Image: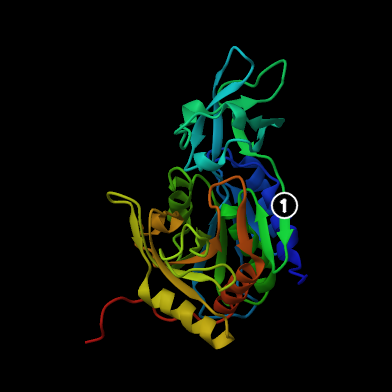
Amino acid sequence: MTDYGNLRTLLGAFTAVPGVSGHEDVMATAFLGALAGFTVEPRIDALCNAIARVPPAPGAAGGMRIALAAHLDTVGLMVKRRNADGTLGVVRVGGLNLKAAPGAAVSVGGLPGMIAVRSQHLARAGEGIPDQDDLRIEIGAALPPMVTTPITFAPQTIEMEGGYYSSPYLDNRAGCAVLAEVARQIAGRTPHEVYLIGSAQEETTCAGAQAALAAIQPDAVIVVDGTLSYDTPEARGKGEVALGHGPVLLDFLYVSGMNGWHAHPRLKEHLANVAAGLGIAVQYDAVHGLMSDARATQPLAIPSALVGLPMRGKHGPLETVQLDDLAGVVALLTAVLLAPLPSLTRGVPG
């Protein structure tokens, strides 16, 4: 098996840490801990964004203020009610995949439990995707946890041949691992002032990234986040992204209403050119039904690009990445941050 070095260590550490959206405190501390020694001025703000800075190398000139962002929070559940039979009713936090949830092992405020599932012998004809009101958490505790206690999938890791890595919450602990590894590689070498942002509440509001970026006011933002792959039977024909084929440069995201985002064309083109110069294969996509912290850059008029980490099973109990894709993002962003950034002025020269 290929040695993916520090990336594997970071993934194991980060995916074991709870952090349902709005409750990122433990993960914020873990993220800053991984940046210690490579960054300065670490801080956690009132929304629980974890922020640290890599200063320009001594004597460097002509650099820009660049932010890298990856969200700390995860989808999950929260205790809604305590049932008379000792089980817990729940409410969903973020876009948790309810179809995949029954039978999953969970942690309820540190207490082990599971999402109950009806025995197949008692299955009913026509049963479909459960509603959140149908879910029950079994914990077997004499004193059930209070209402509003966050519920996360229990940590587990499955490593498969070919660099395939499965765990809960790779969206977006994989992005956090990438940022931490990039910080290690550029420390003392970059001409830029680089801010590393572990953002809060991406899965529910994107408010964390907007607050952090408004405070920092960078010249450019590169967001690293999980994105869709289309290399499983149910997804084939919906797009071209596949695990193991490299980072994804996204151009357009749209959910509904005014919830959309467009990549800055010159910044995206620069990423593509750097990747080509390094021989890193990249993929491209435009996605309906996906949102990210990149959305927070547009009201602030900050040029932004989104580098996607292809994933299977997003927002389910186990998500899967291919570690070569993560290593490719690390190599790409490291190279970008060790060289000058081009002009990001818009418009056609006249």
Residue 139 in the image: above or below residue 104: above
Q: Residue at x 52, y 85 (%)?
A: 276
Picture coordinates of residue 6, whole percent (x, y): 74, 65
Q: Residue at x 76, y 68 (%)?
A: 5
Regarding mark 1 in the picture, which secondary structure is present there?
loop
Picture coordinates of residue 300, whole percent (x, y): 36, 58
Please name whichever residue, 70 or 340, is drawn nearer the observer in this view of the structure.
70
Residue 184 vs residue 213: left or right?
A: right
Residue that protrudes farthest toward the left in the picture: 350
Please name whichever residue, 334 or 329, is drawn nearer the observer in this view of the structure.
329
Q: Residues within 10 Å of mark 1 (few under 14, many from 20)?
A: some
Q: Residue at x 58, y 35 (%)?
A: 102
Evaluate whether residue 37 shows in this view: no
User: Which amino acid is tagged 1?
Assistant: Thr
Residue receiving disc 1: 157
Disc count in the image?
1
Evaluate whether residue 336 shows in this view: yes
Please name whichever residue, 106 or 233, is drawn nearer the observer in this view of the structure.
233
In the picture, residue 51 is in which quadrant? Answer: bottom right
